[in-house]
Amino acid sequence: MLTNFILLFLFSGVPYYLYLEKKKLSSEKIFLLSAFLMLCGMMISLITQQEVSIVVIIALVLSSLFSFYKATKTTNLYKLSYYIMFFNVPVLVFGIKESFYYGISLLVSLFGLYLMAKYYDKNYGSANYQPITGITLVSPYAGFFLTIYLTSLALYPPFPNSILFLNAILSADTNVLWYIIVAIVFFGNFFLAVKVMAKTVFGKPNANVHYIDLSILERSIHIAIFIALITLSILGLQEVLK
């Protein structure tokens, strides 16, 4: 019972929405704190291997849908990062190894998106992508890495999110609720990622914006994240082929 309560608190976005956002904590700090606590919840779920209560799972599905709604209403990449994280929670509560790997891959992709938010914020004064549409068309490195992260989050193969998501589906004990969760998370991730792409990667350049591309240090960090995603893809493919 205690484990179920802890997982509900760590995985449900509601405490963060009710407390952290009300306390005017910056979206940047909320993402970092949420990602850390999410990782703690994943570790607890993996170590205990305790079956999660059906009531907790249903509560997390409802919380996930609320996070999806919040994600569709924001143009802030910091907020989008932790909204997508909370939206994916129902897949992570089954306590199996494959779901844990999917969670790690998800956090890596979202950390890349978080760094893109910092890039927007530092160079254009805001992490909101909508006022500076088309930035990626004239900032090739920024465009490349943002496309990578969004494509990964949209569950496109051969990126690890899609492979590990598939592996989690094949390895889980299937039931009607599980199929519903899979459908919601799959189509929801695709919709949210494509929605952002339409406003950035495929947008029209803004003639009033002075475009600044990623620095060498920033590119190096993103390359490291890209290598991590490729490595996770290989590991995920090995798991699927076992």
Image (spheres, rainbow, N blue to C red):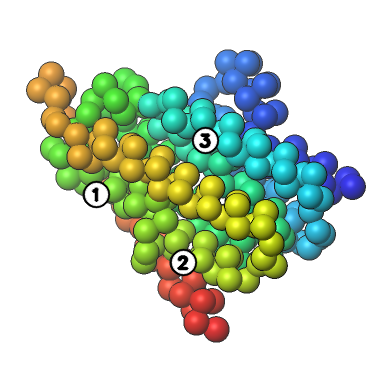
Asked whether the viewer can see residue 133, the reply is yes
Up-down relation of residue 220 to residue 23 (above or below): below
Query: Could you classify mark 2 by the number of other residues whose Cα lies within 10 Å: few (under 14), some (14-19), or many (20 or more)?
Result: many
Amino acid type assigned to the residue bearing label 1 in the image: Phe
Instruction: Name the foreground residue: 213 vs 153.
Output: 153
Identified by mark 3, the residue type is Phe
Q: CA distance from mark 1 to mark 2?
A: 21 Å
Write the residue at 34% across / 52% down. Answer: 151
The type of residue carrying mark 2 is Ile
Q: Residue at x 44, y 25 (%)?
A: 73
Label for residue 144? 1
Disc on the earlier residue, 1 or 2 = 1
Kindly identify which residue carries mark 3: 68
The Cα–Cα distance between marks 3 and 1, rounded to whole angstroms, is 25 Å
Callout 1 touching callout 2 (CB < 8 Å): no
Residue 124 visible in the current orientation: no
In this figure, which residue is indicated by the disc labeled 2? Answer: 163
What residue appears at the point 69 percent right and 48 percent down from the top-left corner?
Answer: 40
223 displayed left or right of 20: left
Q: Is residue 42 left or right of residue 187?
A: right
Q: Up-down: is 192 above or below 210?
A: below
